[in-house]
């Protein structure tokens, strides 16, 4: 699975302004609602419910909030590079500045897990993470996100 299957160029934000975890999730839910036609509230509530199970701040300044939605037709992703790192209750207690939102249809099962794993591998690659933090525009960020990983043969 390639991230280009999940993420469009117009779903990448650079200089994303947010002061809290909840605000990041709210803003991304709004973007997701505009793209999917689903209710922003439904998306937001689904993401918050998932966060209550445990933070999706996976460490190294990265968060991957995700959730499953009944009326969603396909896996879809949104990426935000925050202008300033924020507390996300991450596993390593480090502030987060790279956020990849992943939404999946209720019945996605293995595809949802494969997509989560693929996103995590991409963002945890030290060279890619450094490049994402240095990139100044959405086009450069998108190119880094969808590039094949050198360290793996299959996605």
Image (cartoon, rainbow, N blue to C red):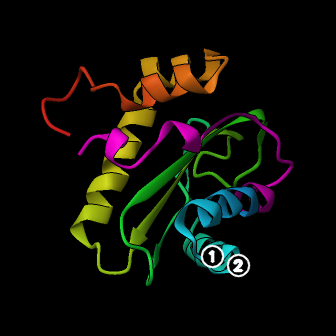
Q: Residue at x 80, y 58 (%)?
A: 23
| Disc number lying in front (1 or 2) | 2
- Tally the marks: 2
Secondary element under disc 2, as helix, strand or loop, is helix
Whole-angstrom CA distance, mark 1 to mark 2, is: 16 Å
Quadrant showing the C terminus: top left
Pointer 1 and pointer 2: residues touching (CB < 8 Å)? no
Secondary element under disc 1, as helix, strand or loop, is helix
Q: In the image, residue 116 lies at what x, y percent?
A: 37, 54
| Residue on which disc 1 sits | 52
Q: In the image, residue 2 lies at what x, y percent?
A: 28, 40
Q: Which one is in front, 24 or 105?
A: 105
Q: Is residue 86 magenta?
A: no
Q: Is residue 20 magenta?
A: yes
Q: Residue at x 48, y 52 (%)?
A: 77
- Of all residues, the one furthest to the left in this rendering is 153
Q: Quadrant of residue 34?
A: bottom right
Q: How crowded is mark 1: few (under 14 residues within 10 Å), some or many (20 or more)?
A: few
The answer to whether residue 63 of the structure is visible from this angle is no
Please report the bounds of the magenta region as a residue range: 1-25
Q: Residues within 10 Å of mark 2 (few under 14, many from 20)?
A: few
Q: Quadrant of residue 11?
A: top right
Q: Residue at x 54, y 19 (%)?
A: 140
Q: Which one is in front, 73 or 106?
A: 73
Horizontal side of 6 relative to 50 (left or right) equals: left
Q: In this view, does 104 lie above or below 78?
A: below
| Residue on which disc 2 sits | 41
The answer to whether residue 78 of the structure is visible from this angle is yes
Q: Residue at x 43, y 31 (%)?
A: 145
Q: In the image, residue 74 lies at what x, y percent?
A: 36, 66
Q: In this view, does 24 lie above or below 150?
A: below
Horizontal side of 108 relative to 28 (left or right) equals: left
């Amino acid at each position: 699975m390639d991230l280009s299957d999940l993420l469009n160029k117009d779903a990448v934000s650079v200089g994303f302004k947010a002061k809290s975890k909840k605000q990041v999730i709210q803003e991304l839910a709004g973007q997701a609602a505009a793209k999917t036609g689903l209710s922003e509230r439904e998306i937001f509530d689904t993401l918050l419910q998932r966060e209550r199970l445990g933070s999706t701040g996976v460490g190294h300044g990265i968060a991957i909030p995700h959730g499953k939605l009944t009326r969603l037709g396909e896996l879809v992703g949104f990426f935000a590079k925050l202008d300033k790192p924020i507390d996300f209750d991450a596993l390593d207690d480090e502030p987060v500045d790279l956020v990849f939102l992943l939404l999946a249809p209720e019945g996605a099962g293995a595809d949802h897990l494969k997509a989560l794993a693929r996103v995590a591998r991409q963002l945890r690659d030290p060279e890619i993470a450094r490049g994402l933090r240095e990139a100044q525009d959405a086009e450069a960020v998108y190119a880094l996100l969808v590039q094949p990983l050198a360290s793996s043969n299959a996605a």
